Amino acid sequence: MAMALPENETRLDEAALARLLAAGEWRRDGNTITRAFTLKGFKGAMAFANRVAEAANAANHHPDIHIERYRSVRIVLTTHATGGISDADVDLARRIDQLLAAKA
């Protein structure tokens, strides 16, 4: 018996995904969406990564978070249960963008 996915874990079709990514800085990479953020130094990168981790935990949707070149944070979102990009990924991407805007 297949387990039902939460409402926000519906795999997006190609047209819906293209519309959602068209206006933002998130990019598609296979079955993921990704974005790199450049912060002010290592401490700023770590603080941002921790805010992302808190938001992800609250959403019960956990991205890959990479600290690169000491001040860059790259976020990779996908929904393993759907085998692709879901509404949950897009919702968390929007929340992450809000986190950055709130500290700008």
Image (cartoon, rainbow, N blue to C red):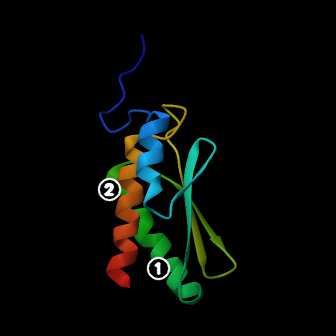
Instruction: From this view, report whether residue 101 is shown above or below residue 5.
Output: below
Quarter assignment of residue 2? top left
Front position in the image: 47 or 21: 21
Could you say where residue 80 lies in the image, as x and y percent from the top left?
A: 53, 36
Determine the residue located farthest toward the top in the rendered image. 1
Q: Mark 1 points at which residue?
A: 47
Q: How crowded is mark 1: few (under 14 residues within 10 Å), some or many (20 or more)?
A: few
Q: What element carries label 1?
A: helix
Q: Mark 2 points at which residue?
A: 58
**C-alpha separation, residue under disc 2 versus residue under disc 1:** 17 Å
Instruction: From this view, report whether residue 94 is shown above or below residue 67.
Output: above
Front position in the image: 1 or 78: 78
Q: Is mark 2 on a helix, strand or loop?
A: helix
Quarter assignment of residue 12? top left
Q: Is residue 101 left or right of residue 26?
A: left
Q: Is residue 59 left or right of residue 85?
A: left
Determine the residue located farthest toward the right in the rendered image. 69
- Mark 1 or mark 2, which is nearer the start of the sequence? 1
Give the amino acid at mark 2: Ala
Q: Which residue is drawn at 40% across and 71% down?
A: 51
Q: Residue at x 35, y 52 (%)?
A: 91
In the rendered image, which quarter contains the C terminus?
A: bottom left
Could you say where residue 67 lies in the image, as x and y percent from the top left?
A: 62, 71
Quarter assignment of residue 53? bottom left
Instruction: From this view, report whether residue 93 is shown above or below residue 61.
Output: below
Q: In this view, does 66 lie to the left or right of 77?
A: right
Could you say where residue 61 lies in the image, as x and y percent from the top left?
A: 41, 48
Instruction: From this view, report whether residue 32 is shown above or below residue 11.
Output: below
* Label pair 2/1, CB-CB below 8 angstroms: no
Give the amino acid at mark 1: Ala
In the rendered image, which quarter contains the N terminus?
A: top left
